[in-house]
Image: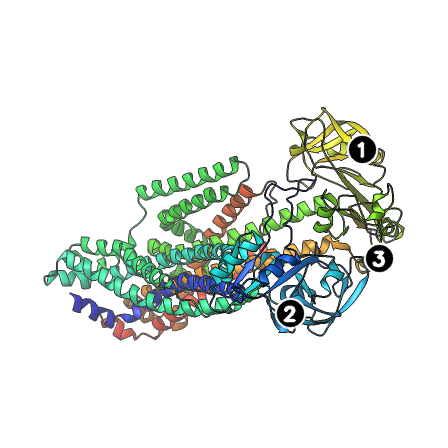
Amino acid sequence: MLRTTLAGLRLHKSRYVTTVLAILLGVMFVSGTMVFADTLEGSYEESVMGSATSVDAIATPEADEDAETEDGFPADPVPFEQSVLEDIRALPEVADADGLVRGQAVLLDDEGRAFGFTPPAAVAFGETSRFSASEGELPAADDEIALATSTADQTGFEVGDTVTVLDPDQDKREFTLTGLVNFGVDRSYSYGGAVVFAPDTIQEMTGADGYSEIDVLAAEGTTPEETAAAVATVTGTDVRTGTEFGEKMAESSGAQTELLRIALLLFGVVAMFVAGIVIYNTFAILIAQRQRELALLRCVGAKRGQVFRSVLTESFVVGLFASVLGVLAGVGIGMAGARFGGQMMGTEATASVVVSPTAVIVGLLVGTLMTVFSALVPATRATRVAPLAALQSSATASGLEKGTGWVRVVFGLLAFAVSAGLVALAQMASPDPSGLFIVTGAALVAFVGVVVLGPLLVRGIVRVVGVPLRRMGVPSMLAVDNSTRSPRRAATAMIALTVGATLITGYSVISASVESTMTAQLEEQFPVDYQVSAQYDPEARAAAADPEEEAPEEELEEGAPGEGAAEDGTSEDGAVDQGNGDPLVPVEVEEKLNESPLLDKVMAERTTFLEETTDSGMTGTPVTAFFDAEMGVDIQADAIEGDIADLEPGKAIVSENSAGGLGVGDDLTVAAPSGDLELEIAALLENGTSFWGVTIAPEDFSAAFPEIGESSLLHVRAADGADPAEVRDAVYTAVEDHPTVQVMSVAEMKNQFSEMMDIAFYTIAAMLGLAIIIAVFGISNTMALSVLERTRESALLRALGLAKGQLRRMLSIEAVLLCLIGAGIGIVLGVLFGWAAGAAVLPDLVFTVPATQVAVFIAVAVLAGLLAAVLPARRAAGTSITGALASE
């Protein structure tokens, strides 16, 4: 039997081409995903470890976990003093050591605006350091600077350019960019960016003192562990070796690759699911076509078990062969993904390709076992047909010609009912990410219903669509008859495309709905064109709140502003703060904006933080007022209770977490410096909205906090009909003398969000496209096997006068019908579950169906059908009429 099975494989190898391709693509995706993730993770580790292991020990100061600043923020670690560095250098276990000084400095971009929401880190280090220049050279002179590679990418600066940085007095200083430093995945530098000064310049530019890190080289004959232990006796802190430090950083960054691995593997599972359907369909048709052959084997003495094992052996050989090819292709895909996909995510795969045994073994097991499992039902079915009955030509495809019994109908309808119940359950619960699991379960149950009722759906749809098709000519009429004659075969062919269409349509609906919802929320929260704010400086806030921080002598006199400040508390460039370090927009900027005829409204948002609100007991509560804005019109938000439009003097809008259990109509007492403020709650807002804390009327704010005349944020709305370019110039002209004042275009932010969603959609759609490719192979496979099965029938049609072109059109129409049915059912399911998934996660979902994307997908389905029919149609048209009629 083994020789017979292997001989059959060699003789009919053309039958397995598309099956091998389906398995190959599925295995390629799974193995390629694992190779890609492993290589990218190895690249992360190599990048981090490479910098950390360039030194033997790394000491960092530790913060007191119980220490807090006056306003409740965690206290920063106290830097090492110069004496600590000298003591470390004196250790016999240490060959050399240098410290890293770290502060913050305002970097101006090429438009002269402050870069980043917060100032980037400013560092300086000596020759002994875990960092080095990846391009150019490190700064050595007072007028030289280096940038982090990520910062240079975002600002567009290159080596040799002139870079402007503000000193502590907000004066502009120009530097020559001499080099770039790759800080790797160190989050303390990768998020906000970094600039590197010469060691003699850092104090002058930042005022920073002490060392936030000390890098150590071990003396000859001393291990890194011994050096780290010796350094720890001096610092009194936990000192890691370079390797330990790098491993810790690599571990923290590994979460990104692990998340990516899980996401990609989910798509791999989808691809394998679709491939499994195709493989099952292929073996079902192959076994049905070979019933006469298997029956003849049983007639000459083969037992049922031998026939069953021969079919499984056949599937094992095909699955193993295709899986080996899939693993090899997966390694290539993983290499390409790590090379180009890493760049898209802002990192490069510098490590060699990592092909782990797990990636190889999982690929082989998944492909082989899935193929064998897919052949179980056809193999069992092949042994149940009596040999003499199977020898009859009418039994060739009996397993595929059966109709839809009432048991199948009941089971299918039950599956749809369960799916609908799960969708309803997901909508009844409050919006939560866990609802996605319920919707996913509902979709899987619905797929079961489609599989079970597939023949009935195909027959019903074809009968409706076939009415006009029958009038379009003989090829169309024959194509309709062929589809209704074997609905089970047609259903198993189109189900793979249905799954792919559901996934892509569902994600399209989710993407479009999320984008519409977020855009609506942005328009609600920011019904303006521009927002103007000052760059946030966490170090200034910490210094302002730190009771241990000594003020300059000039500030010790009551009411006297410090050096570099004007009488009104503004700095030399006009920036102001509230006394807690939060920056405010200079009054001059607000005045210039109000004077511009191109602007309709300039709404000022002023905020201060209180130590407590007496009724709720909440500390650090923000109190906000919107000047020159109409609540409920210019500023909008949905209220749990009340209406924000009811805000007036003597009333307040309170977020739920600041209400302390109070509700609309209750009295709230706010402990203002000028005296307690008695307010009635007009509206209660849900946590997480743009309103946080207590919002009061402008009149109450001015009376309670007369010293705050500047705004933390300005909302700017252009006049109707104003030219957008002129409006932009007017806004930027108003802030040109204040480089730390930042301008955000809400329109640009919406466009960036839209572009981000589009990139995410096309990226995921490209991955899901693999499922569509496999589905097209499945339909092509079904068509090829169907043509093979109907060789005599096609020859008889040709003998009766059907031309070659008509035969090709008949098969093309049949394939397009299958693709359109599969795509149509998938689109309906995709729209339904896309809505369900979005509504389960987002409150107030703006349901959007991307009609253009759906139309494109329908066009792709038609094209896929035509492509799937090309080779089978050519084969059928090229077959000899007499030869086919003579064969039996």
Of residue 827 and residue 192, the one placed in the foreground of this image is 192
In the image: residue 460, left or right of residue 844: left
The residue at the far left in this view is 301
Task: Measuring from the top left, give residue 331's x and y in whole percent.
Answer: 41, 68
Residue 823's spot in the image, x, y percent? Answer: 47, 55
Q: Tell me the distance, in whole angstroms, between the alpha carbons under discs 2 and 1.
A: 49 Å
Camera-side residue of 696 and 80:
80
Along the polypeptide, which appears first: circle 2 or circle 1? 2
Q: Is residue 408 above or below residue 28?
A: above
Any part of residue 630 in sight = yes
What residue is disc 3 on?
Answer: 730
Left or right: where does residue 715 sit relative to residue 434?
A: right
Look at label 3 and name its amino acid: Ala
Q: How far separated are the C-alphas under marks 2 and 3? A: 35 Å
Residue annotated with mark 1: 673
Q: Secondary structure at mark 3?
A: helix
Q: Which residue is mark 2?
A: 180
Calculate the distance from the C-alpha at mark 3 to the C-alpha at mark 1: 37 Å
Q: Quadrant of the N terminus?
A: bottom left
* Kind of residue at badge 1: Pro
